[in-house]
Image: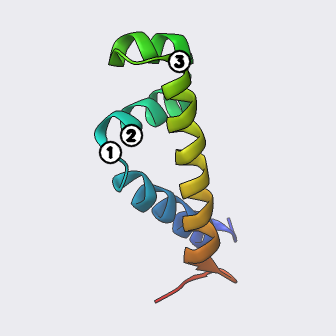
Amino acid sequence: DLHYPLRRQRQMCIRDSIDTFKPNMRTAFLLSQIEGVSYADIAAQLGVTVRTIERYIAEGLFRCHCMLRDGVVAGQARP
């Protein structure tokens, strides 16, 4: 796959972003985006409201987007 190096860099940027999340936000984000768990189930598991989970996911997506935007330029990671 000719796009593998760029895909790999994007994955690393996203992983770097997720690593900066606070524990509950990281858990909520991974359960939702990777495992497909519903917001209601995540909220019950973490003992928070569904609205809190919505905020966690929105912030997580925004932060990943920013990391990708700022971290990968023309197929190369910025220094």
Tell me if residue 45 comes above or below residue 51 in the rendering: above
The answer to whether 14 is drawn above or below residue 69 in the figure is above
Secondary structure under tag 1 reads loop
| Residue carrying label 3 | 50
Q: Is the Cβ of the residue at disc 1 closer than 8 Å to that at disc 2?
A: yes
Q: Is residue 58 visible?
A: yes
Q: Nearer the viewer, residue 74 or 56?
A: 56
Query: Label 1, label 2: how many angstroms apart (C-alpha)?
Result: 6 Å
Pointer 2 residue: 26
Q: Residue 20 in the image: state x and y as whole percent.
A: 35, 56
The residue positioned 61% from the left and 53% from the top of the image is 62
The circle on residue 61 is none
Q: Which callout, 2 or 3, points at the residue further toward the start of the chain?
A: 2
Q: Secondary structure at mark 2?
A: helix
Measured Cα–Cα span from mark 3 to mark 1: 17 Å
Q: Is residue 36 above or below residue 69?
A: above
Query: Residue at 70% across / 71% down in the picture?
Result: 2
Crowding near pointer 2: few (<14 within 10 Å), some, many (20+)? some
Residue 23: give x, y in percent of width and height.
29, 39
Quadrant in which the N terminus is drawn: bottom right
Instruction: Label 3: state its secondary structure.
Output: helix
